Amino acid sequence: RPNRLLVQSYVLRHVGLWLLMRALMSVLFVSAAVSAHARFNPLAMPLSGVSTLVLVSMSVNLVEMARRHEFDLLGNLGVTRAAIAAWSLLPPLLGEAVLLAFRP
């Protein structure tokens, strides 16, 4: 059973990075819509943008973990790289699912 404090710290950091990536992508899409004189709802991002955002967010999470040398720590605790990748994918995927559920 994983340590609750350890899982909570990683999930919160992954959620924070996803929120930052989501905000940056929303600004990018809104600025593109303004330059094209179109209206754009930043919550209603196209599916290609959402899937790209999820994958980029997961990649940023994994790069951040590699930068902090956390793969070794987690490996010593018995966590496989596949489990790390899955846990890195969950916060952006669930966040986008929640936004999709509450989209106007």
Image (cartoon, rainbow, N blue to C red):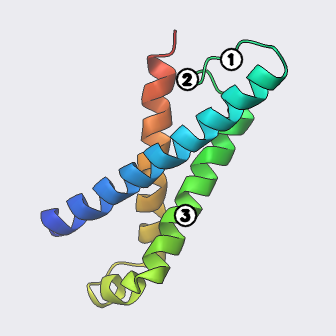
> Which of the two residues, 87 or 45, is positioned nearer the viewer here?
45
Give me the residue at 37% from left, 82% from top.
70
Q: Position of residue 102 (x, y in %)?
A: 44, 16
Give me the residue at 62% from left, 17% from top.
41
How would you rate the neighbour count of disc 3 (Cα within 10 Å): few for under 14, some for 14-19, many for 20 or more?
Answer: some
Horizontal side of residue 13 vs 50, given as left or right: left
Q: Are marks 2 and 1 in contact (CB under 8 Å)?
A: no
3 or 1: tag closer to the N-terminus:
1
Residue lying furthest right in this view?
36
Horizontal side of residue 35 vs 74, given as left or right: right
Q: Regarding mark 1 in the picture, which secondary structure is present there?
A: loop
Alpha-carbon span between mark 2 and mark 1: 9 Å
- Is 6 located above or below residue 58 in the figure? below
Alpha-carbon span between mark 3 and mark 2: 21 Å
3 or 2: tag closer to the N-terminus:
2
The quadrant of the picture occupied by the N terminus is bottom left
Amino acid tagged 2? Leu
> Which of the two residues, 15 or 6, is positioned nearer the viewer here?
15
Amino acid tagged 3? Val
> Residue 43 bears which disc, if any?
2
3 or 1: mark nearer the eye: 1
Residue 1 visible in the displayed image? no
Q: Which residue is mark 3?
A: 60
Q: Position of residue 101 (x, y in %)?
A: 46, 19
How would you rate the neighbour count of disc 2 (Cα within 10 Å): few for under 14, some for 14-19, many for 20 or more?
Answer: some
- Is 61 located above or below residue 20 in the figure? below
> Residue 40 bears which disc, if any?
1
